[in-house]
């Protein structure tokens, strides 16, 4: 099949490239999901418009390749100059296309821990790190939630990167319970998050004292009157309680 595609002149439209399978996938979606880099390259050369096609879940082939971690395919997709008269401004928006839950390709790569894909996207469109999905979740929050410190670092290359998470949380809320390194990375960039509460209970992150940047946050209380040490105790996080007492001996009150 690959040889047949390669022998067709540019601009040719084999019927098979425009077909859609279950879920609205085109052949380029399938190649991207399965990691068939050469086939994807050949199809993209013949039908660049397929890069912009969305299936029933709203995914473009770029979403599919990013989710699966096929960085060579993503790099090929995002670095290809598409002829303007064919797709107009579509290529400029390709990495900002959102699927059915509002995820961009960068969300999919960050959520699934694919560092090389994140780096490929950031090299082309670093400001895509500012985009949040329908739940208000940023790619960096997703990376923090899964403990992917290298991805967090890569996303922080962009000055525009968002740290937002669901229900008014920031990535620090996720990081403090997952990864000390990510907690440090976030607080180095945005120390103000040490005092930011979520939208549900105005609860601040529990492990903020690790950087000793502002111990007063350990005495802040949420709307129910609970300080971080109370929340840590109710959840059974003995290590967090120990850290709180080490840095703030009167945090019991």
Image (cartoon, grey):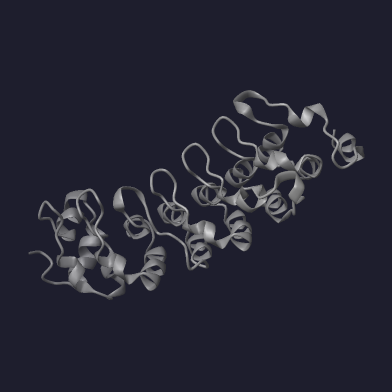
- Above or below residue 130? Residue 185 is below
Relative to 181, 169 lies left or right: left
Name which quarter of the figure residue 121 lies in. Answer: bottom right
Residue 219 placed where, x, y %?
14, 66
Q: Residue furthest bottom?
A: 213
Q: Residue furthest left?
A: 253
Relative to 239, 52 lies left or right: right
Residue 222 placed where, x, y %?
15, 56
- Above or below residue 199? Residue 26 is above
Residue 240 placed where, x, y %?
25, 61
Residue 214 placed where, x, y %?
24, 74
Q: Residue at x 12, y 55 (%)?
A: 226
Name which quarter of the figure residue 22 lies in. Answer: top right
Q: Residue furthest top?
A: 22
In this rendering, the count of numbered labels is 0
Name which quarter of the figure residue 14 lies in. Answer: top right
- Above or below residue 213? Residue 105 is above
Q: Residue at x 24, y 58 (%)?
A: 197
- Looking at the rendered image, the quarter that the N terminus falls into is top right
Relative to 158, 78 lies left or right: right
**In front: 153, or 85?**
85
**In front: 247, or 121?**
121
- Looking at the rendered image, the quarter that the C terminus falls into is bottom left
């Amino acid at each position: 099949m690959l040889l047949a595609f390669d022998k067709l002149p540019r601009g040719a439209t084999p019927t098979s490239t425009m077909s859609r399978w279950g879920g609205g996938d085109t052949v380029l979606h399938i190649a991207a999901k399965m990691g068939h880099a050469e086939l994807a390259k050949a199809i993209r050369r013949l039908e660049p418009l397929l890069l912009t096609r969305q299936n029933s879940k709203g995914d473009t082939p770029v979403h599919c390749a990013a989710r699966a971690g096929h960085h060579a395919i993503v790099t090929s997709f995002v670095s290809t100059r598409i002829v303007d008269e064919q797709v107009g401004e579509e290529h400029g928006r390709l990495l900002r296309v959102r699927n059915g839950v509002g995820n961009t390709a960068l969300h999919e790569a960050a959520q699934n821990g694919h560092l090389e894909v994140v780096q490929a996207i950031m090299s082309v469109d670093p400001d895509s790190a500012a985009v949040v999905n329908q739940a208000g979740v940023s790619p960096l929050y997703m990376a923090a939630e899964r403990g992917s410190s290298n991805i967090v670092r890569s996303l922080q290359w962009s000055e525009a990167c968002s740290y937002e998470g669901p229900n008014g949380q920031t990535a620090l809320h996720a990081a403090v319970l997952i990864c000390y390194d990510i907690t440090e990375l976030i607080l180095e960039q945005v120390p103000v998050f040490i005092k930011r509460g979520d939208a549900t209970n105005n609860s601040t992150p529990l492990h903020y004292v690790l950087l000793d940047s502002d111990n007063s946050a350990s005495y802040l209380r949420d709307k129910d009157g609970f300080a971080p040490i109370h929340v840590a105790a109710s959840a059974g996080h003995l290590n967090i309680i120990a850290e709180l007492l080490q840095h703030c001996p009167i945090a019991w009150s």
